[in-house]
Image (cartoon, grey):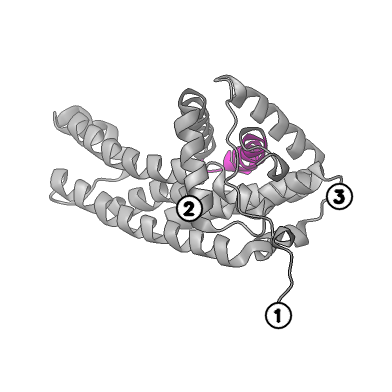
Amino acid sequence: MDNQNPRDEAPFRMPVVRDIAPGAWRRWLRKGWEDLRASPAASLFYGATFSIMGWLLYLSVGRGEYLLALMTGFLLVAPFLAVGIYDISRRREHGEGVQLVPTLTAWRGNAPAIGLYAVILALLLAAWIRVSVVVVALFFTGGMPDFGHLPDEFLRNPEGLVFLGAYFAAGFGFALLVFATSVVSIPMLLDRPTMDTLTAMIVSFNAVRQNFATMLSWSLAIGALTALGIAPGYLGLIITMPLIGHASWHAYRETIAPAEAA
């Protein structure tokens, strides 16, 4: 007969979401910058990886509509690609020495949950590429012009602004879904090896719902920094992407109470 004490296995408790002031994103970026400065080699490696990926997409995709879909969809999978950056901040927080190689396999600490979320993001990326191509085809029957000629095309074609509105409206829906379910979920999956994917996504959604103004400000800051990184030929991503990743770790740590407080 099993005489195990019921207290030996603690009951599951949903992580507690804290109330965060709207201006917290400035503090997160400041702490993220401190992490970047403290671990420049590892952080900039990930930033350079994002930059190279951007260039490879630009050089390998010929058709403008697919390039536009992949460039914008690139942001949908960025939360998973930043796992190593989160791990740098986590190690610094615990007073551990930061080396690049261990962060490359940080996802193995909770491989099933992080892997499942990666699959979800991949499916969302595939869906977004299809939607993006369809929206472009509705407005450019002869194929999308080169990016360098897009401003002239919009000036000549009165439907240019309609296209921009339709495209960004469609993209906003995908971006909102990914942001709401990932803003704290992947750092939490890394930090709590026993956490499952669905629970992490629910907690992340609740964090956005409970701190909507704060998270809206944070999403706008992420968008601005990403655009700033892409603008100079993707070179800015070397700095902006690790900065966003480190700041996202601190956003998680401030927004979700420690497991002991659940």
Spatial CA distance of label 2 from label 3 is 28 Å
Q: Earlier in the sequence, mark 2 or mark 3?
A: 2
- Name the residue type under label 3: Glu
At x 39% / y 44%, what residue is drawn?
177
| Left or right for 224, reference 124 | right
The region drawn magenta spans 233-253
Q: Give me the disc on residue 96.
A: 3
| Left or right for 242, reference 53 | right
Q: Is residue 60 above or below residue 141?
A: below
Q: Which quadrant does the N terminus fall into?
A: bottom right
Q: Position of residue 86 (x, y in %)?
A: 67, 47
Q: Would you say residue 236 sits in the magenta stretch?
A: yes
Q: Nearer the viewer, mark 2 or mark 1?
A: 1
Q: Secondary structure at mark 3?
A: loop
Residue tagged by mark 2? Answer: 77
Residue tagged by mark 1? Answer: 1
Q: Give me the disc on residue 123.
A: none
Count of numbered circles in the view: 3
